[in-house]
Amino acid sequence: MGQGEFRAKLMRCFDDLTARVSAENGDWTVKGFIDIYQRIYTISLDTKVLSKVLELLILPVLAQFAETHNYELVLAQAQNQYPDFSLISRDDEAECIALDIKTTYRTGGDKNGHVRVNGMTLGTFGGYFRTRDRPLNSTFAYNRYTAHYVLGVVYSRVEDIDERRVYRIADLDDIPSVIRDFQFFLHEKYRIASDRPGSGNTKNIGSTTFLERLLNGTGVFAKLGEAIFDDYWMNYRTRSMARQEGFDAPPYTNLKTYRAYKKRGAEILDLPEDDIETEAGDGVSD
């Protein structure tokens, strides 16, 4: 199955996904956690908790998709393992698709009227992303995957929820949902990536924080292509990484400075070959 065909078929599951997570009025179908005494505890707005519950709701739909289209669905064996799901075609073993589930919430509009979201991390730009020929905190080697997709969920948070309150089953209709108004998107990772890290000093690729770009897959690398995305992030250095390697500062910090950096290197290639001298042989010295 080609990548375009894979995406089109998985997007046909969006109605099923929406029905799993959203009531007719837009509220989340999940109201809380229940114990054996039928007490219901309100879910907090902790993004990690919300993301995991949403992933559990999505999993049965993905399992049905895999069965229908003859994929083996392989789940990550650890929380920090990439990707969340690997789909291996039983018709063509060369086809192996990475699928990460990502969630984020709307934060309001900016001064230009664009809806913004909190953003997401799209995996490390170290580890398996740079060491691509063997598994390294990943289910399979990065190069084993023929495509890297993100299945995303965008929602709005409901403020002023009393997380201390405990409900009974009889109160189910009165329990407020902590999130609502869901939108799904499915794009290859490079199409929604930013040119900045995801958060703080972590070595994670950040996503765009514009809702429209998330939904349409029109991030800063979308027109440049996956090869540029790979080269940019495989060679990206934080300040601490640059210092550890003996440099005063990173070679670039965004796509504009990346372009200038690559242009400086390319200028050497414009010199006539006879003007370039070398004292190094073809071998590699110790």
Image: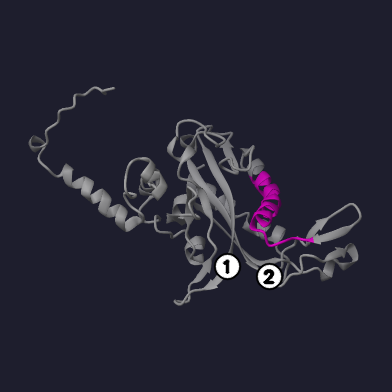
Residue 235 visible in the displayed image: no
As helix, strand or loop, the secondary structure at mark 2 comes to loop
Q: Which residues are magenta?
A: 42-65
**Chief secondary structure of the magenta portion:** helix
At 70% from the left edge and 50% from the top edge, which residue is drawn? 56
Whole-angstrom CA distance, mark 2 to mark 1, is 11 Å
Q: Nearer the viewer, residue 213 or 40?
A: 40
At 27% from the left edge and 50% from the top edge, which residue is drawn? 261
In the picture, the disc for residue 158 is 2
Q: Nearer the viewer, residue 129 or 278?
A: 278
Sequence order check, earlier mark of 2 and 1: 1
User: Residue 128 lies in magenta, yes or no?
Assistant: no
134 w.r.t. 239: above or below: above
Give the image location of residue 286, x and y in percent: 29, 22
The quadrant where residue 120 appears: bottom right
53 w.r.t. 165: above or below: above
209 w.r.t. 241: above or below: below
| Mark 1 burial class by Cα count in 10 Å: few <14, some 14-19, many 20+ | some
As helix, strand or loop, the secondary structure at mark 1 comes to strand
| Mark 2 burial class by Cα count in 10 Å: few <14, some 14-19, many 20+ | few
What residue is pinned by disc 1?
A: 106
Q: Nearer the viewer, residue 156 or 74?
A: 156
